[in-house]
């Protein structure tokens, strides 16, 4: 297995569900574009122009065909991501058509929120039920430094999502030592004030090596200690919001519900992983933190049968490794923006 390049694995005769480690994989994250209107330091390497290979990117019809096949295999939960999914012009058509596919129970969205003010209502009407909105800092200068964007547009997007009646709106912040420690408490207060779950996410090595160093890594245990200095953290062991790996705590007296996603320091992180990812150029990533990919685009473009596509998806599930390889000397073969968060 090459450490520095993505590679497709050969197709075996059969595959099984649940996967080889007893995990039921029924959640497909679909990156509908690797284009983004922001430039997050930890996600998109400078000079990245993956989207220049536009003909490689799946059309709406191709995405919908795969969703139909996945739903037929028992996938029930879907998330549209990117890049930034809201920059794709046919997003609403994709959502509407997905929502009508039998078996599709939940469609969520991961977004930077900058375009939600205009799109939240039509997206909700089209069938999006929940949104995860990235917000690494409330301070406008720091937000701009991390993402290249304007925090006011995100705040307007969050308000619009709540106003549009999304069943769940969560706020996600990536932890960056030396950058947003000072924002943790303001983010908690923001979450409490708006009644929105907030998740703190450990930095994963999925972009530029200079950003993803030990020096920038802020483990969740340290964040919990910082918060404990002000508040009581009451574990919410039964709290599983949506389909994610976060461990939730209620902060008292502020009242915020805060989830911690310790992708690197939680040794049990992968035990309940229930997802695979589809990249914008038609590759299934069984694991975010491993290079293995299964090519579906080639099959789609030679008009493979539903049965062949289903076999490829089952194969991808069977290829899901027991755990990610982030704790080794992992070098990404594609940046996060090209995988889909
Ligand atoms: N543009 C959308 C957004 O901002 O949410 C969707 C795509 S983004 C890749 C999805 C999620 O991945 C975001 O919450 C983002 O913060 C997270 N992410 C990106 N790079 C990361 C990294 N190196 N470590 C941890 N999380 C990362």
Image (tube, rainbow, N blue to C red):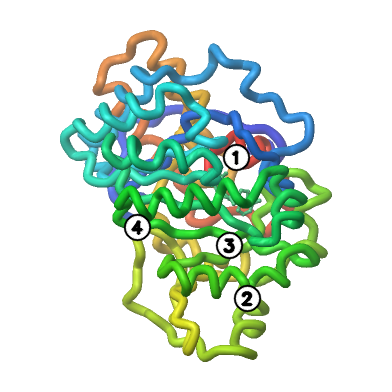
Q: For numbered disc 1, what is the local secondary structure?
A: loop
Q: Is mark 2 within 8 Å of ligand 1?
A: no
User: Which circle's residue, 1 or 2, is located before the other in the chain?
Assistant: 2
Q: Position of residue 15 (x, y in %)?
A: 32, 38
Alpha carbons under labels 1 and 2: distance apart: 36 Å
Q: Which label lies toward us, 3 or 1?
A: 3
Q: Is residue 219 above or below residue 143?
A: below
Query: Can you tell which mark lies on residue 201?
Result: 3
User: Which circle's residue, 4 or 2, is located before the other in the chain?
Assistant: 4
According to the picture, the residue beneath numbered tag 4 turns out to be 168
Q: Quadrant of residue 28?
A: top left
Alpha carbons under labels 4 and 2: distance apart: 22 Å
User: Which circle's residue, 3 or 4, is located before the other in the chain?
Assistant: 4
According to the picture, the residue beneath numbered tag 2 turns out to be 185
Q: For numbered disc 2, what is the local secondary structure?
A: helix
Q: Position of residue 234 (x, y in %)?
A: 44, 87
Q: Are marks 4 and 1 in contact (CB under 8 Å)?
A: no
Q: Position of residue 271 (x, y in %)?
A: 43, 63
Query: Can you tell which mark lies on residue 291?
Result: 1
């Amino acid at each position: 297995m090459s450490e520095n390049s993505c590679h497709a694995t050969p197709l075996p005769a059969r595959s099984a569900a649940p996967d080889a480690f007893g995990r039921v994989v029924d959640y497909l994250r679909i990156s509908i574009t690797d284009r983004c209107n922001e430039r997050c330091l930890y996600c998109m390497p400078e000079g990245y122009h993956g989207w220049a290979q536009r003909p490689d990117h799946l059309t709406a019809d191709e995405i919908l065909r795969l969703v139909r096949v996945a739903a037929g295999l028992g996938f029930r939960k879907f998330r549209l991501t990117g890049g930034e999914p809201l920059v794709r012009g046919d997003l609403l058509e994709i959502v509407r058509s997905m929502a009508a596919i039998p078996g599709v129970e939940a469609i969520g969205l991961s977004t930077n929120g900058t375009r939600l003010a205009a799109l939240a209502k039509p997206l909700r009407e089209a069938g999006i039920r929940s949104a995860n909105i990235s917000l690494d800092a409330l301070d406008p200068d720091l937000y701009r430094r991390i993402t290249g964007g304007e925090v006011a547009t995100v705040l307007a997007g969050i308000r619009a999502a709540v106003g549009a009646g999304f069943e769940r709106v969560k706020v996600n912040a990536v932890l960056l030592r030396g950058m947003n420690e000072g924002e943790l408490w303001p983010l908690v207060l923001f979450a409490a004030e708006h009644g929105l779950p907030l998740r703190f996410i450990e930095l994963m090595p999925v972009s530029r090596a200079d950003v993803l160093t030990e020096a920038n890594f802020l483990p969740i245990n340290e964040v919990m200690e910082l918060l404990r200095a002000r508040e009581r953290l009451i574990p919410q062991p039964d709290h599983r919001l949506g389909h994610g790996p976060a461990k939730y705590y209620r902060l008292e007296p502020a009242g915020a519900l805060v989830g911690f996603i310790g992708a690197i320091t939680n040794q049990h992180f992968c035990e309940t992983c229930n997802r695979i990812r589809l990249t914008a150029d038609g590759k299934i990533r069984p694991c975010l933190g491993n290079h293995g990919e299964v090519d579906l685009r080639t099959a789609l473009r030679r008009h493979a049968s539903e049965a062949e596509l289903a076999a490829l998806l089952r194969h991808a599930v069977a290829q899901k490794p027991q755990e990610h390889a982030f704790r080794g000397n992992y070098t990404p073969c594609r940046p996060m923006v090209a995988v889909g968060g």
